[in-house]
Image (cartoon, coloured by chain):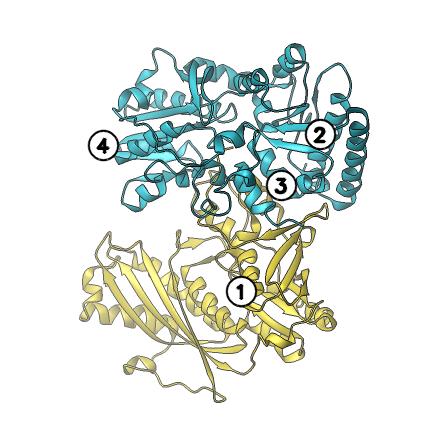
Chain colours: A cyan, B yellow
Amino acid sequence: MLELLKQSSNPEICRPLAEAVKEKAKEYYRVHGRKPAFMEVCGSHTMALARSGVKQALLNEVNLISGPGCPVCVTDQKSIDAMIALAEGEGRIICTFGDMMRVPGSRYTLMSAKTAGKDIRVLYSPMEAIKIAEQHPDKEIVFLGVGFETTIPILSLLIGEADQRGLGNFSIWMATKLVEPILRYLLDQGETQIDGFLLPGHVSIVLGEGSYSYLADEYNISGVITGFEPAELLSGIYKLIDIAASPEAKILNDHKSIVTKQGNIVARKWMATYFTHCDEAWRGIGIIPKSGLDFKPGYERYNAKKRFNVRMEEPRKTKCRCGEVIRGLVSPNECSLFGKACKPLNPIGPCMVSAEGSCSAYYQYMRESI
Amino acid sequence: MGKIISLAHGDGGELSHRLIKDVFVKIFGNNEESLFDASVVDIPGSLAAVTTDSFVIKPIFFPGGSIGKLAVAGTVNDLAVSGAIPLYITCGFVIEEGFPISDLKKIAEDMAEEACKAGVKIVAGDTKVVERGSADGVYINTTGIGAYSRSFGNRLSFKEGDAVIVTGTIGDHGIAVLAARGDLGINVPVKSDCASLNKMLDKVYQNSEGVQIVRDPTRGGVATALVELAEDFSLDILIKEELLPVKDQVHGMCDLIGYDPLYLANEGKAILIVSADEKENILEILTCFPEGKDSVVIGEVTGTEKGRLLLETPLGSKRLLSRLAGTMLPRIC
């Protein structure tokens, strides 16, 4: 497997493949009179495309639009403010993934709350939260549940574990998002020209190849499930140009070594055990019906939103255009704050913070690419 | 003396005396120096190089090293990359009340062993004890003194085509320490590269006139060290991603948590910028040493104007590398 991965970034394989993609894209141009425009749904794809140089190499031939797949970036500002406010309460330990630490709230970040003495812990493995809850029976342990279907099964595992161990001091602040509703929303709005989707490799492990049929059946738009190494990205784009040019849309799995047709049924069963669909607010978009998950009746004791009385305030407005960036309407450098007031060390919006954010990827890898 | 450090070990009385005598003097083997408040040392040549560094690390013991080994090797390397021959080290300990004396002994033994390997003498020391909760176990400060014989970094001597060498795989220390904290919940078989490099570098200095400058890419990693070199000497440096030596396990862990090996700490690696005509000779010398056996050229100086570091991806496109922006944080998925 490792050898295979190494081959996937071998220049002798990647460079000719990139040339082949360019040729294919030129062919598309000749027929359609414009470059093919593809949206990468996943934040890890955004990062991988920029970091590997694939995006730069195809700049003139393929329009790659970053989509709404960075979990931190799509989290509503109000929700971020609430999570930070949650940390202010006494007797709490807030557990989070690292990305959340520097996300600016209306007033400050979790990082600055930690510096000011609040107990906020960055976890590498969410299961640590259970350990912490056991070690501190006198404290309330709250896990910040941010993420898509890749992360949600892990949150289910946490609830299962807490339930089994009878932990009364553990809860989750749910701000999770689902892939299908946001893709439908983007297509329904039709604000951006999208000729096809590079579908997320990670999320698809859980959802399975079969879960995207609505794209082809209802919207007549194609998608290719793609891996993250340079050769995999190029192969995915090549195949997407190929099927996007044909009149009949279809979904192709180009990540078969990992993604199966039916996905991870066990993980989805776990999700369904504890969670049910709910309306969810997306940054820069607003509420999309049934686009998030909330606790099922019977598990509400794990719901931090019910457990703690956190004051929800209207967020402070900035000129940040993250909302438009995640909808694919503008590219990061079109925001007046980009690279000036907003940089990785002092980000204004979440897209500059997360390792998977479009602005961060653009700043780190494309700002002065040659 | 007891099994754990108490505040009395730091009050200058009997227990302090015993701690110093039974742990540090005994293990460091400096009976003579301990009689006086200051050590008198001999420095060959007329110039001395001096450096100081403080070591705080969690966990204190990790695969491939400990805070003790690090405190000696780190300071030795700071002298060695500056072109000095490390000779003496002083050490100051800040110890938390309740710290096990057996651990302190192990740390001192690691320091003595590394000092012996590097050929430096520990000539002065100090111990302070702070209340439980006021420190995290133990902190060590070391100051190094070396004989300064060569000067590097002559702005005019850098040339287009100068080679950038790294003396082995990058990011091992960063990942080893992260894994040793147990946070990852994954057993990662990577050891810290923590090692003194002075003997290897001295051999290079003695056998080649081609060294332009040397740095040790510790915190901030290879990328940050090279950005600093590029800016300090107005060098345009181009490194190639496909040439970077990264262990499979380090690569895998970085992919998993969203870290970049270029920004991970190293504690036993040096970066050398050397003239093109000497690079083969220098590589040959470096690869003779166990700590340099994986030395490779990772890039070159492409100009002496702009002062920036570029990375060429396997696809041939180039991108600008900056210093590490804040702490690296693990990502969500």
Q: Does residue B320 appear to the left or right of A348 in the view shown?
A: right
Q: Secondary structure at mark 1?
A: loop
Q: CA distance from mark 3 to mark 4?
A: 46 Å
Q: CA distance from mark 2 to mark 3?
A: 15 Å
Residue that carries the numbered disc 4 in the rendered image: A138
Q: Which residue shows up at 66% across the image and 79% down it? A: B209
Tag 3 and tag 1, C-beta contact below 8 Å: no
Residue that carries the numbered disc 2 in the rendered image: A236
Q: Amino acid at mark 3?
A: Ala
Residue that carries the numbered disc 3 in the rendered image: A50
Q: CA distance from mark 2 to mark 4?
A: 51 Å
Q: Nearer the viewer, mark 1 or mark 2?
A: 2
Q: Amino acid at mark 4?
A: Asp
Q: Is residue B53 visible?
A: yes
* Residue A218: percent from left, percent from top: 64, 10
Residue B216 tag number: 1
Q: CA distance from mark 1 to mark 2?
A: 40 Å
* Residue A254: percent from left, percent from top: 70, 26
Q: Does residue A196 appear to the left or right of A185 in the view shown?
A: right
Above or below residue B206? Residue A271 is above
Q: CA distance from mark 3 to mark 1?
A: 29 Å
* Residue B197: percent from left, percent from top: 55, 68
Q: Nearer the viewer, mark 3 or mark 4?
A: 3
Q: Nearer the viewer, mark 1 or mark 4?
A: 1
Question: Which chain is mark 4 on?
Answer: A
